[in-house]
Image (tube, coloured by chain):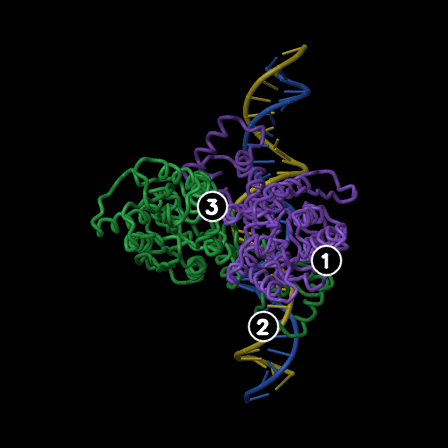
Chain colours: A purple, B green, C yellow, D blue
Amino acid sequence: MKINIKDVARKAGVSTATVSRVLSDFPGVREKTKIQVLKAVEKLNYEINAVARSLRQKKTNSIGIIVGNVLSQFYSVIAKSVEDTANKFGYHTILCNGDENPEKELEYLKVLKSNRVDGIILTPTGKNSEYVQNLINSRTKVVLLDRLIEGVDCDAVLVDNTIGAYKAVKHLIDQGYRKIGIVDGYLDRTTGAERLKGYLQAIEDAGIAKDDSLIKIGNFKKESGKKLTKELLEQSNRPEAIFTTNIDMSIGALIAIKEMGLTIPDDIGIVCFDDSDWALILEPPITVIRQPVYQLGSMAAELLIKKIESKRKKVKKTPSIATLETELIIRESTKKKI
Amino acid sequence: MKINIKDVARKAGVSTATVSRVLSDFPGVREKTKIQVLKAVEKLNYEINAVARSLRQKKTNSIGIIVGNVLSQFYSVIAKSVEDTANKFGYHTILCNGDENPEKELEYLKVLKSNRVDGIILTPTGKNSEYVQNLINSRTKVVLLDRLIEGVDCDAVLVDNTIGAYKAVKHLIDQGYRKIGIVDGYLDRTTGAERLKGYLQAIEDAGIAKDDSLIKIGNFKKESGKKLTKELLEQSNRPEAIFTTNIDMSIGALIAIKEMGLTIPDDIGIVCFDDSDWALILEPPITVIRQPVYQLGSMAAELLIKKIESKRKKVKKTPSIATLETELIIRESTKKKI
DNA sequence: ACTTCATATGTAAACGTTTACATTATACTT
DNA sequence: AAGTATAATGTAAACGTTTACATATGAAGT
């Protein structure tokens, strides 16, 4: 039914080897033969079986990417940039939604390995360090994105979360806010931990005492952002400003503030990690820490593909970790009225 | 290096056939043997080669999905729901970003075919009808999502765009708006065409004359939404209200309105196709037509997998097309002041 | 003990490519 | 025209599974 390389060979009156050579653009095929073959391909409507090719070549020309939460705008952009970049290099992408869930992550790692992807980009939950380390040891190409895994030596592309968070909180302090709350995500993700660290550093540098009741830890998702913000705003020592540490929690926080009928920045100041189109059209526009999200993804993909395509046995040098800078975009959600 | 089924067989002291049977949970393997095999698998840290399996079985347990624009929130949700659903049935997903570009779409269709995915979910640009029809004729399982392709008989899961648009515009009219502009996307996508149709029907039913200068056609992307809205608002016969036909153009429109310093709904009313979290936290909250996006994706995936797994030769019956209803969510962006 | 039958396991071909190696055709010397 | 080097093509094994078919094992019936 389905036609294969043999059919093409027969039709073109050559061997399968020659057909294969033509299809793979190998040098050393007479122009005349090449044309015959291509004509046969055309006539038969032949399309190569990439599965068979992958089996023989031990190469799938595909990479896998496991993201934290595909619904998040952050990861959409990551998905797009990884895909664009992979594409540019002739790879296609298998997108997996880890959902911030270690078991799902592990499951996907296995699926990707089993499917013999040429490499994996992983936004780790941090929980499967043993498996990931084994993966790397067994020469699977892995690049971590956005976060690290404790105890695992792996190339990575990150953002400087500590400095980013520091800038955000420092800005609040400079604006005159003193009582500053933080709505953060999992502390076992390096992102969560580092953003908290930046927050703590900033208040310490300003001589503000740490107040545990102003520190709320959730799971990086919208609902949790909403719930924790409500908590902060309902408790007796309500903060004057809030720092939310990712885009989804920020949305949640803004919903909570809206629902409680508070106004920004008069009742409450807010600065969010991650920029977005809607941050600009809100009233007032929201001050944010902007990450170079697209670049994050494209650098990770490029690094991964470089690793895949570098012939030389890895010299087992220390892993290459790129850390990108963030940018504070000041808008009006942090304009404390005096 | 990499261990395979032979190594496992040797270690367990059985044949490869038996190992395969254990791994695939075939009945008729003695419990004792099964345990031996599993022990060997464990010891050797064996992981099956899905590529080889796919080749032999002519089944990859994967589906491809080509979306219009992965950056759009609409398609993120689609991606997630398709992936969730595919997963539930034991399939994994290859996500491709067609980018509303017919050539990219064609390219991806070929890649997916070549990679022998078991089925394809496609948000078509409408331009590759010949290739898609061939695909279907050659028994590739395809389900169209969100839009149809003229002249192609294919199962599909859609939304009732005409009625949705009608409801949106009717609502504007009911609120007292008469001069209503529309910022629409490609008319050669059925979504674009139908939403325009609903708009036209609504104004006709209300006895309002069609005014071509109020009808702006773009490409469903943010920039185009912004540009066209600016045009509408700058021209001499400025509309009193605008209907934007997808989420990305809506963002663009809102940015334009904001930049021009106009206020909603006093200077301009607006109703958008597609709901979103930020529609709720904007000031004022935006009236929208909500699509059942998650359901759209999960139904498409389910339909596709049903098709894949139905044994019986397709009886070539008429394609099954599901059309889901939309919902008008009235908020404050359409409250015309009297 | 000898069939008979069911159950468990093994053997080897097949899936559709690529590619090392062998062979043949062509071009170039003399 | 023969010999040689080079270029073009062909042959067949290999990739790692699954599975039809063959065979071995064991239990049950006589």
Residue under numbered circle 1:
A129
The residue lying at 55 percent from left, 53 percent from top is A264
Residue under numbered circle 3:
B69
Q: Can residue A201 be seen from the camera position used here?
A: yes
- In this orientation, which residue lies closer to the viewer: A246 or A150? A246
* Left/right of residue B273 with respect to residue A225 in the rendered view: left
Given the image, what chain letter belongs to the residue carrying mark 3?
A: B
Q: Residues within 10 Å of mark 3 (few under 14, many from 20)?
A: many
**Both marks 2 and 3 on one chain:** yes
Given the image, what chain letter belongs to the residue carrying mark 1?
A: A
Residue under numbered circle 2:
B28
The residue lying at 57 percent from left, 58 percent from top is A253
Distance in Å between CA atoms under marks 1 and 2: 38 Å
Residue type pointed to by label 2? Gly
Residue type pointed to by label 3? Asn
Q: Can residue A143 be seen from the camera position used here?
A: no
Distance in Å between CA atoms under marks 2 and 3: 49 Å
Q: Position of residue A244 (x, y in %)?
A: 62, 55
Given the image, what chain letter belongs to the residue carrying mark 2?
A: B
Q: Residues within 10 Å of mark 1 (few under 14, many from 20)?
A: some
User: Circle 2 sits in a helix, a strand or a loop, which is it?
Assistant: loop
Residue type pointed to by label 1? Ser
* Left/right of residue C14 with respect to residue B232 in the rendered view: right
